[in-house]
Amino acid sequence: MWFFKAYRPNLGLFGRAQTSASAPSRKCKLTQKAVPHVFQLERPDLYEITVVQLQQLYSSGSLTSVEYVEINPYLEAIIEVNPDAIKIAARLDEERIRGKIRGALHGVPVLVKDNIATKDKMQTTAGSWALLGSIVPQDAYVVTQLRNAGAVILGHTNMSEWASVRSKDYSEGYSPRGGQVRNPFDLSRTPYSSIVGPAQINSVVGIKPTPGLTSRNGVIPISYTMDTVGSFGRTVADAVSGFDVIVGQDDRDALTCDPQRGKKENYSQYIRSRGVLKGAKFGLPRKRCWDLVDEDQKTVALKVLDAMKEAGATIIDTDFPCAEDRIPNDGEWDWLVFGNSPLLEST
């Protein structure tokens, strides 16, 4: 399953990634026996399947889009299921039989965050009771792109109500409409929110694009200058497959029309082996960033940094120029100080 989410700032670091589009998915050390029963799959070969592997099963006839949509077990984190998902999957299976394949996402089920509008039988509420019953005028631009690419919109994910912009004290991943989301690998923890945080905590790949690469039209807004929509995937290749689809200029979002921001191209072409890291330089911001990372997370992150060094990369200790002015002592972003939109300030 692949996720598309709108971003809000946080200081999460380091999602694990696979850099080769053709490489097989790693063997998961967390076996089915270690996973709570509600999250187990009937077919273990689908447990951590990638987009490329999924398309191979589709092409061989050993799996259909309908079958994959039906066995998905992660509904505990979904706020609403698309009642037409099976019909849509069946239609895409028929297209494949006729030889029409729209692209890498053909027949692939995806989820969108509950603050991204879908003009169908589902509601878009940002996890809040306040918007129950509201009717959106049209699909969000990114949803239109996903549908055109052959993706099956499986449902809306639960989320922190109003993307956490409602109070300084709240439960991460909780909404009154959907309840408390829990990490499927550890039910005592939350999967976190936004893009960077979940990628870090759940060991998946998240792409948080520069605002203007993807349209925010049809997304319940927070900040005009910082809102952006990105993708999650099991691997880098998976995340990029989704990202390629949603990138594009949209006349309803002026920022995507800025030639210095919006840029439609095939980002899959930039996927390389680890050899591309030779000679590359990366900055590691320390003050009020790395210095505040929990020790257990640092242990994991250091393994990634060491692997990057072994591949020829250089890690340079650095600081954000305005770290002390912009980042509080505890590292928590202060929306009241830094998160206001110019549009909101003028109203």
Image: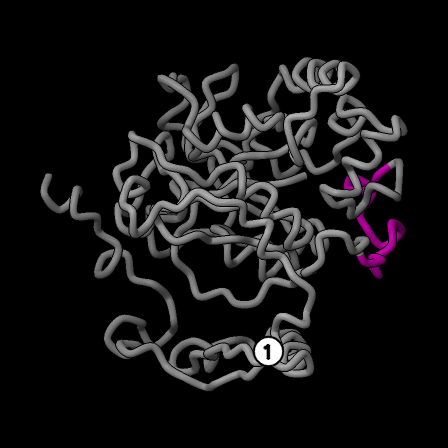
Question: What's the magenta bit mostly, secondary-structure-wise?
Answer: loop
Residue at image coords 13%, 46%: 345
Tell me which corner region of the image, top left, top right, bottom left or bottom right, holds residue 337.
bottom left
Magenta residues, as a range? 26-41
In the rendered structure, the answer to whether residue 168 lies left or right of residue 16 reads left
List x then y, in percent, for residue 64. Answer: 81, 25
Residue at image coords 57%, 67%: 14
The answer to which of 28 and 309 lies nearer the viewer is 309
Placement of 118 over or under 257, stated as above or below: above
Reply yes or no: does residue 30 show up in magenta: yes
Placement of 199 over or under 77, stated as above or below: below
The answer to which of 143 and 324 lies nearer the viewer is 143
The residue under label 1 is 298
In the rendered structure, the answer to whether residue 281 lies left or right of residue 249 reads right
- Figure quadrant of the C terminus: top left
Residue at image coords 29%, 52%: 260
So how many labels did they put on this image? 1
Tell me which amino acid carries mark 1: Lys
Placement of 117 over or under 297, stated as above or below: above
Residue 11 visible in image: yes
List x then y, in percent, for residue 296. Answer: 63, 76
Reply yes or no: does residue 263 show up in magenta: no
List x then y, in percent, for residue 236. Answer: 64, 54
Q: Mark 1, residues whose alpha carbon is within 10 Å: few (<14), some, or many (≥20)?
A: some
Tell me which corner region of the image, top left, top right, bottom left or bottom right, holds residue 181.
top right
Placement of 217 over or under 119, stated as above or below: below
